[in-house]
Image (tube, rainbow, N blue to C red):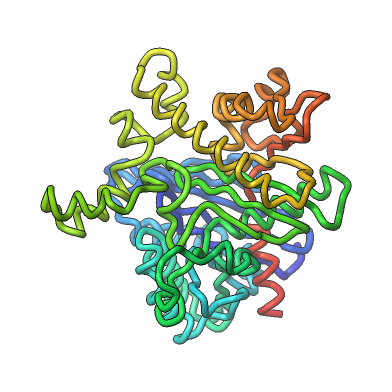
Amino acid sequence: MQNQLILVLNCGSSSFKFSIINPSTSIVYLSGVSDNFYSNNTLICLKQFQKEIRYIYLKKYMSYKNIIKEIFKILLVQYKDYMNNVVGIGHRVVHGGDKIKSSVIINNTILDIIKENSIFAPIHNPINLLGIQIALILIPHLKSKNIAVFDTVFHHTIPQYSYLYGIPYYFYEYYSLRRYGAHGINHYYVSKVSAVFLKKQKNLNIISCHLGSGSSVTAIVRGQSIDTSMGLTPLEGLIMGTRCGNLDPSIIIYMSEVLHLKISVIKKILNEESGILGINKISSDFRILEKLYYQNKMVKLSIKMYCYHLAKYISSYTVCMKGRLDAIIFTGGIGENSHLVRKNTIDQLSLLNLIINNKRNLEIHSGRSGFINASNSLPIIVIPANENQIIAEDTLKLVC
């Protein structure tokens, strides 16, 4: 075993993931995920060298904080051979605001910036911060080797005419209110991988669709982000699992002034009770919804809305492509696994010479990658998300 392993912590809004990676070889020695929080039957799934090895059931109520601590206990006791070779810890952080333009070594100033930007990512940054704080305490010998890798960094190349809102300019000048985007780590990753698929290493023009519980679309021109669907916060853009996406601001005014709802209640509705779940009232989990698509009219409506809004974003971002679109990319949990979402979306885009190969579309799922377009279509590629590889690479650069 090479002795330059990186522990990657990805504290998400709906799951906690970790990996121990050799970024130089891309070998994943150990990985795990838990996404059944706040229940009496929390599950942790562990994989060694990408092969499932065990499930751990914690037969008691577990908060997010306790799950992270439990996983650290498992790592430090049962997998200490790996942990002894870890030289740095990389943390995914959603929002870095306008002050952070690259991955950074974590210190008190960085912790303050992450906390300060929690107002822009209220269901992400506080959890990201929690993972960092626990790591600093439980692995003290690596305290100066904790690195924050931000989703917003990739989007700092977006031009001003794209990231500004149509509100008085002083809100940007004095309060930094602008479009920041999210999922930048994975949008950057798929842009690199798609270049390999297309055998075109430079000046790649793609539209990247990161589809999961949170979803975003990014226009990437010559390898750089120039527009993205999420905005000041991860609430803007596509309809998502529980988030509303684009909304007429007057709806919020109506909720407040006419319905007399408190801002805290409105915030909860828009972040946690809207989107796919808000429409069908059953679930935001596409694994469940696809089984009900032909049985429940509200489930069908929610998925049709999702695909329609996704197709609109893809078509609108062709404006950014400087006359040449090289590929459409599907990534993220839904993008990688939902043949239904991919087909329903692409079927609305034949005018752009995007045509799906139904057989290939059905074959690509569960971590597989590849082309799903017909022979007479522009390339459409499925690429599994791999934020952890980018986080590990950036971490190694800063700690060694």
Task: Count the numbered circles shown.
Answer: 0
Residue at 46 percent across and 64 percent down: it is: 165
**Residue occupying image coordinates x 17% and y 55%:** 256
Viewer-closest of 281 and 301: 301
Residue 141 lies left or right of residue 134; in this view the side is right
Q: Nearer the viewer, residue 94 or 320?
A: 320
Camera-side residue of 49 and 33: 33
**Residue 71 in which image quadrant:** bottom left
Q: Is residue 132 rendered to the left or right of residue 280?
A: right
Residue 228 in sight from this viewpoint:
yes
Quadrant assignment for the N terminus: bottom right
Return the x and y of residue 42 as percentages of the image width and height. 35, 44
Residue drawn at x 22%, y 54% as measured from the top left: 253
Q: Is residue 114 visible?
A: no
Is 246 placed left or right of 399 in the picture?
A: left
On screen, residue 31 above or below 281: below
Residue found 74% across the figure and 29% down from its top: 353
Q: Quadrant of the C terminus?
A: bottom right
183 sits to left or right of 291: right
Query: Residue 372, located in which quarter of the rendered image?
Result: top right
Percent coordinates x, y for residue 123 in the rendering: 36, 58
Residue 156 x/y as whole percent? 61, 69
> Most extreme residue toward the right, as rendered?
199
